[in-house]
């Protein structure tokens, strides 16, 4: 089977700006897409393509414009000519390739359209691999952050009986053998666009940079080539595909946030189990709780941040779904009535609303109530630590007071000793039990210790009473009330009127 004028177009989408960082701030690898284009130029030996970045840079050295400018919504980056034409002969091929590169900025996204074509009216299907030499246009090579779409367009030389079978053959020809199976695991969706059949394939990779979306568009209607060459559909389609890529990217990011949030929640659950089994020993318990008061607020902040990111990704999906619907309506306005069928594009919109947005809603409904648990654990830990610390402080104050008053009593005893103990002629200090008369020094020492001990005991009793005066007051009140309730009634006090 042969085809005429086959071409393969890559639409790759790469994030230029992170709106959270500001409209004028570029992401770290913003120029990755243009660097990949230059590498493609090296593979195909196209010098004009190897210097693409130099051609794209403005007088300020930057590529593109600030998002605050109106023309950022759809800006052609090459000046004065919007297209960069080139030709090449890939290694191992005898057919000459012609190509065009069309770089764009669509608001916060860099977009590149790279088209490789064979300008021949008779090309064997087996020779189509030259349109994608060494798989250079696949997502595994380009690695655009938001993903990509490949569109193959060709006119079969003869009438096709099995459209899906022929499309599968074309797909197998433009892909390396190792990549074919992942696109054929499920049957493609078939529709009609500008009068001719179009089939949709995907590899369903979770990572947007590895996710590849392929459309096989077969020119089987007299109007198709004319309408395709006119290009009225082009801006609508590329904007729609950009919205599609952003939706898939946002959902992929939401899966990462959901996974991280659930991991934090499991850690919190483990701490909640330990919380119920805190050590009874006050010092160990206080140490454990203080460690948690350092860890849990950080975990709570991270958890809240993941929930916020989930909500942002949901908003991104909902916003791009509306934009997708807008561009889909634009495409619907130029189709061939009663012949075209864009149901495959509608299916993605329904999938976005019914599956992707709904899944994030379910995640949030599960995770949001758990956010309160962080606050409750922090509050409970603060309460216990405050109580334990207050008790520890009171015990310390009590000890300091007892020691202080004890030393004061001992000091008073030492001061009074000369006045209380009779003065005697200087005597040597004899061994214990060698006399029944205490030496004046010993008497002074005992007096000091006795007064110190007495002051310490009085202080202990006084501080205990002061610290527990609330409990004592409540107990006395209870006794008084209990006594009044049990008082004997006077005769005649039970009279009835």
Image (spheres, rainbow, N blue to C red):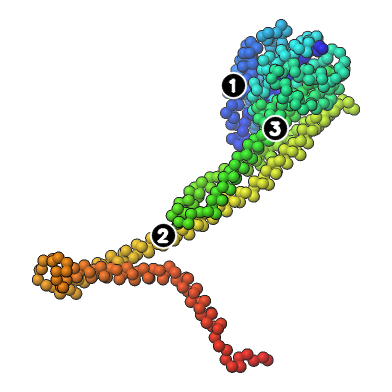
- In the rendered image, the residue lying farthest to the top is 94
Position in image of residue 39 (x %, y %): 61, 16
Q: Which mark is residue 59?
A: 1
- Find numbered disc 1 in the image and state the secondary structure of the residue it sits on: loop
- Find numbered disc 2 in the image and state the secondary structure of the residue it sits on: helix
Residue 77, quarter of the rendered image? top right
The residue that disc 3 covers is: 248
Q: Where is the C terminus found, in terms of image quarters?
A: bottom right
* Residue depicted at 50% across the width and 73% down the height: 474
- In the rendered image, the residue lying farthest to the bottom is 492
| Above or below: residue 451 compared with residue 240 | below
Position in image of residue 209 (x %, y %): 65, 27
Of the numbered discs 2 and 1, the one sitting upstream in the chain is 1
Q: Is residue 344 left or right of residue 46?
A: right
Residue 139, quarter of the rendered image? top right
Q: Nearer the viewer, residue 450 or 413?
A: 450
Q: Residues within 10 Å of mark 1 (few under 14, many from 20)?
A: few
Q: Is residue 417 left or right of residue 67?
A: left
Position in image of residue 377 (x %, y %): 55, 52
Whether residue 236 is visible: no
Of the numbered discs 3 and 1, the one sitting upstream in the chain is 1
* Residue depicted at 61% across the width and 15% down the height: 51
The mark lying in front, picked from 2 and 1, is: 2
The mark lying in front, picked from 2 and 3, is: 2
Q: Nearer the viewer, residue 314 or 200?
A: 200
* Residue depicted at 74% across the width and 24% down the height: 183
* Residue depicted at 45% across the width and 60% down the height: 390
Of the numbered discs 2 and 3, the one sitting upstream in the chain is 3
The residue that disc 2 covers is: 393
The mark lying in front, picked from 3 and 1, is: 3
Q: CA distance from mark 2 to mark 1?
A: 69 Å
């Amino acid at each position: 089977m042969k085809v005429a004028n086959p071409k393969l177009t890559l639409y790759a989408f790469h994030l230029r700006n992170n709106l959270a960082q500001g409209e004028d701030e570029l992401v770290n690898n913003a120029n990755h897409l243009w660097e990949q284009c230059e590498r493609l130029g090296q593979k195909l030996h196209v010098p004009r393509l190897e210097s693409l970045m130099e051609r794209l840079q403005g007088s300020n050295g930057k590529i593109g414009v600030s998002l605050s400018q109106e023309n950022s919504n759809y800006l052609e980056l090459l000046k004065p000519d919007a297209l960069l034409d080139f030709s090449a002969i890939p290694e191992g091929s005898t057919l000459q390739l012609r190509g065009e590169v069309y770089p764009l900025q669509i608001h916060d996204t860099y977009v590149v359209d790279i088209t490789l074509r064979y300008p021949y009216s008779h090309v064997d299907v087996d020779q189509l691999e030259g349109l994608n030499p060494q798989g250079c246009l696949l997502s595994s090579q380009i690695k655009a952050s938001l993903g990509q779409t490949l569109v193959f367009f060709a006119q079969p030389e003869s009438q096709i009986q099995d459209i899906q079978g022929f499309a599968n053959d074309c797909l197998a020809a433009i892909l390396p053998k190792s990549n074919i199976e992942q696109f054929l695991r499920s049957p493609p969706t078939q529709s009609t666009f500008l009068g001719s059949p179009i089939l949709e394939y995907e590899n369903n990779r979770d990572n947007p940079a590895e996710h590849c979306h392929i459309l096989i568009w077969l020119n089987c209607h007299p109007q198709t080539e004319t309408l395709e060459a006119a290009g009225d559909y082009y801006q609508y389609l590329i904007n729609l595909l950009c919205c599609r890529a952003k939706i898939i990217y946002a959902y992929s990011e939401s899966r990462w946030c959901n996974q991280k949030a659930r991991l934090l929640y499991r850690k919190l659950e483990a701490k909640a189990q330990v919380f119920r089994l805190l050590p009874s020993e006050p010092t160990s318990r206080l140490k454990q709780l203080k460690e948690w008061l350092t860890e849990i607020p950080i975990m709570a902040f991270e958890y809240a941040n993941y929930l916020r990111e989930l909500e942002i990704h949901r908003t991104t999906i909902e916003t791009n779904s509306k934009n997708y619907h807008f561009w889909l309506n634009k495409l619907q306005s130029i189709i061939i009535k009663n012949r075209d069928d864009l149901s495959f594009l509608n299916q993605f919109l329904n999938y976005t609303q019914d599956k992707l947005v709904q899944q994030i809603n379910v995640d949030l409904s599960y995770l949001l109530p758990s956010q309160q648990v962080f606050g409750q654990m922090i509050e409970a830990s603060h309460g216990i630590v405050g109580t334990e610390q207050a008790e520890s402080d009171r015990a310390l104050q009590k000890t300091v007071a007892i020691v202080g008053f004890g030393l004061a009593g001992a000091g008073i005893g030492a001061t009074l000793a000369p006045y209380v103990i009779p003065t005697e002629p200087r005597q040597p200090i004899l061994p214990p039990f060698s006399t029944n008369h205490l030496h004046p020094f010993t008497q002074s020492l005992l007096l000091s210790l006795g007064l110190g001990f007495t002051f310490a005991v009085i202080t202990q009793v006084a501080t205990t009473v002061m610290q527990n005066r609330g409990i004592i007051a409540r107990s006395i009140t209870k006794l008084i009330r209990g006594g009044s309730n049990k008082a004997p009634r006077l005769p005649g006090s039970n009279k009835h009127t």
